[in-house]
Image: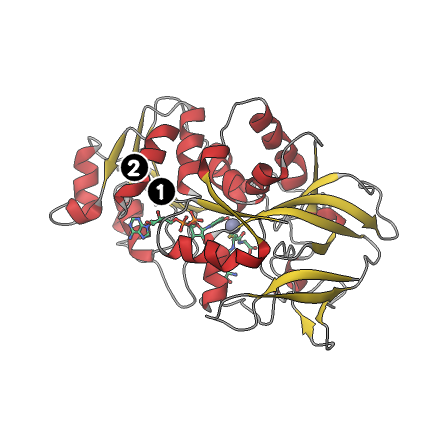
Amino acid sequence: MRTTAAVALEAGKPLEVMDVTLEGPKAGEVLVEIKATGICHTDEFTLSGADPEGLFPAILGHEGAGIVQEVGPGVTSLKPGDHVIPLYTPECRECDYCLNPKTNLCQAIRSTQGQGLMPDGTSRFAMTNGTPIRHYMGCSTFSNHTVLPEIALAKVRSDAPFDKICYIGCGVTTGIGAVINTGKVEIGSTAIVFGLGGIGLNVIQGLRLAGADRIVGVDLNDTKVEMATRFGMTDFINPNEVDGPLAPYLVDFTGGGADYTFDATGNVEVMRTALECAHKGWGESIIIGVAPAGAEIATRPFQLVTGRVWRGTAFGGARGRTDVPQIVDWYMDGKIEIDPMITHTMPLSDINKGFDLMHEGKSIRSVVLY
Ligand code: NAD
Ligand code: AHE
Ligand code: ZN
């Protein structure tokens, strides 16, 4: 079939909206009509050329929601008409990783996914002249139609609005999951969140849900304060207004350091600060941000010897087919909020404006509506 997609032709160039060809679903695969997709900083990271796994031409996008159009042979858990959220972290429920309760990192299709290919090692997308186009994070939601493995789709209730629940495909689940699944934050905790964007705000909302007492937000951009406060931030620090090193300042500000700190910036210097302002003896620092190719984290080992813990989280530790439908229910039941964070919407033809708004620090989430 033909469909319309925003194609990343090369690193550092705007996306180009064009007709592409899409092969139908093979065994174990599903054709989905995407109805809405968010633009996450990770899409920008890959488009910029900073992603060691970045391949071009590719159809980016990994934060979508849509409707099943067709299923390939052997698909049993989905049927045409089902509402779904694509999962860049699939859940096969059979691999060693899925069977180990300590991780959500299903590895059933990770190697082909990282090469921008379907599990059989081929792409379903091509230019109209036949040039193959790579998939991205197994999702490629910047296309009106896409094909995914059955294990990479969460079936969700049909009364939930696509233009809001698409955000659960990455940002909402990542931020809330980092608190609930990865940090297992206790009631009464003190936390510091670095980066108050589409992910950091959901960390804040997760901390409020978990019953944290003090939620300190850190960002270079003062315009993020209003939204962060609305979601539960109790204190704000702009590092540009702090004299001297930030970590000791934050240790002092929190009366000895935070029980939990979160990096949602992707900056390795910030990650170091986040570790070093975690409380001596027990503070945990959780890396969410994705750092560019070649970047490395550093600290004095003494920081760990004296009890701080450095951890990371992908997709908030969530097992998508199991957890995502539940998070959709939380949204529909009013337990979590999404709508105010979707600051901009646009048609696919204007998708590059979404990237511009992100670069300018003017948006929290831009959502493309098909
Ligand atoms: P965003 O652009 O919406 O937000 C980033 C925020 O960080 C902005 O408010 C910006 O002002 C702030 N910031 C930048 N540099 C800073 C600094 N030095 N100090 C303090 N604040 C600073 O991005 P996002 O969509 O929220 O994504 C955040 C990060 O999380 C990205 O690196 C993204 O790739 C990553 N991410 C990771 C996962 C995962 O599963 N681990 C999932 C989604 C996104
Ligand atoms: N490809 C990059 C790493 C990118 C990365 O860390 N991706 C996160 C999700 S970011 C969503 O916005 C992730 O889940 N990683 C786990 C995985 O298996 O990819 C690189 O550095 O190579
Ligand atoms: Zn993302």
- Residue pointed to by mark 2: 225
* Mark 2 element type: helix
What is the CA distance from the residue labelled 1 to the residue labelled 2?
8 Å
- Amino acid at dot 2: Val
Residue type marked 1:
Leu
Vertical placement of residue 16 versus 233, above or below: below
**Snapshot quadrant of residue 258:** top left
- Do callouts 1 and 2 mark residues in contact (Cβ within 8 Å)? yes
Percent x, y of residue 105:
59, 48
The residue closer to the viewer here, 76 or 232, is: 232
Image location (x, y in percent) of residue 162: 63, 39
Left or right: where 43 falls relative to 363: right
- Find the residue positioned furthest to the right: 73
Mark nearer the viewer, 1 or 2: 2
Q: Which residue is mark 1?
A: 196
Which of these two is toward me, 123 or 113?
123
Q: Residue at x 29, y 56 (%)?
A: 269
The answer to whether one can see residue 138 in this image is yes
Rendered image coloring scheme:
secondary structure
Whether residue 119 is visible, yes or no, is no
Q: Is mark 1 within 8 Å of ligand 1?
A: yes
In percent of width and height, residue 81 lies at 79, 40
Residue sitting at 65 percent across and 67 percent down? Answer: 134
Quadrant into which the N terminus falls? bottom right
**Left or right of 201 on screen, residue 97:** right
User: Of all residues shown, which one is farthest toward the left?
Assistant: 243
Position of residue 156 in the picture relative to residue 274 (left or right): right
230 is higher (above) or lower (below) than 37: above
Q: Residues within 10 Å of mark 2 (few under 14, many from 20)?
A: some
